Image (tube, grey):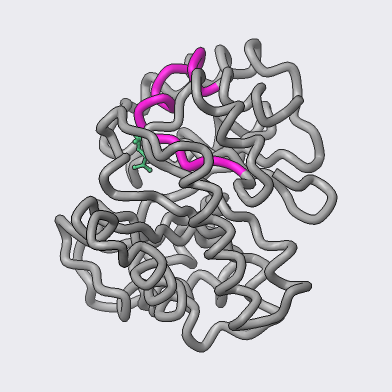
Amino acid sequence: MNREFRQTVIAGNWKMNMLASEVNAFSERLGTLVPGFRDWCGVVVCAASVLLPAAVKAFESIGVGVGAQNMNQHESGAYTGEVSAGQLADIGVGYAIIGHSERRELYSETDATVNQKVLATLKSPLRPIVCVGESLSQREIGVTGDIVAMQIKMALHGVAAEEVRKVIIAYEPIWAIGTGKTATPEDAQEVCRAVRNILASLYSDEIAKVITIQYGGSMNEKNALELLAQPDIDGGLIGGASLRPESFAAIINAANQ
Ligand code: PGA
């Protein structure tokens, strides 16, 4: 983390877990475990669409933002089953995860779709959390840097310098997601630094310096402190460990010291 230049953002990704009836108790418990957030530390919970109204209501009182896990790139129209950025913002949602590897793998999201979704969030009040990351075989072949560079260049195609500060990048090695295998802090730092270098080459050093880059992939209460101590890791996107207020709070507290 580098608090001098950029905001730390700890975001939970609940995926297809939790019920609306459980959200209040979660928020109350989290509020008791985390004594208050500092200015430079944002906390967000990304919940399933159906939970979002309850989550916005419950988390407002403890200063936690709410994010969607996906959204449609179009403003409105005949897209049965889809939700737009405008609809999310209208109910108080402030963030949207874009291009999570599960969306890319299981729902055939391409870099081109990811780009359209990023552009759609930037026309709305939402802040996109753009996920990039390599598979195990790509890491073994040694193309992690190329893959991540391509994903970022594609995701940010057409994004102007004055808009890109709103973007959060989440580096999530696919082999570390939900597996209990975390990238070592050094490996995670190396790729997050490479991400910042790509941003500098696309925009400028000044802009790259202020963009929040998260690490995601089996981040938990045990490894968070070490990961967050890396200079280019400005937060986390946390799946499994965000489902219990105790473990999520421990990660927030690690960032919020
Ligand atoms: P995990 O998930 O923390 O359970 O590995 C992270 C993510 O998918 O964003």
**In terms of depth relative to the viewer, which is nearer, 152 or 190?**
190
Question: Compared to 161, does 212 lie above or below?
Answer: above
Residue 175 belongs to magenta span: no
Q: Is residue 69 left or right of residue 164?
A: left
Q: Which contiguous range is marked in magenta?
A: 235-248
Question: Compared to 149, does 90 lie above or below?
Answer: above
**In terms of depth relative to the viewer, which is nearer, 154 or 143?**
143
Question: Compared to 49, does 106 lie above or below?
Answer: below
**In terms of depth relative to the viewer, which is nearer, 117 or 135?**
135
Image quadrant for the C terminus? top right
Q: Can residue 126 be seen in this view?
A: no
Image quadrant for the N terminus? top right
Q: In this view, does 41 lie to the left or right of 142?
A: right
Question: Residue 98's spot in the image, x, y percent?
Answer: 40, 61
- Tell which residue pokes out farthest to the bottom in this image: 158
For ligand 1, the image quadrant comes to top left
Residue 245 belongs to magenta span: yes
User: Residue drawn at (23%, 68%), measured in percent from left and top?
Assistant: 109
User: Residue drawn at (68%, 69%), measured in percent from left and top?
Assistant: 208
User: Residue drawn at (64%, 51%), measured in percent from left and top?
Assistant: 232
Q: Can residue 155 be seen in this view?
A: yes
Q: In which quarter of the image is residue 226?
A: top right
**In terms of depth relative to the viewer, which is nearer, 196 or 257?**
196
Question: Residue 66's spot in the image, x, y percent?
Answer: 53, 43
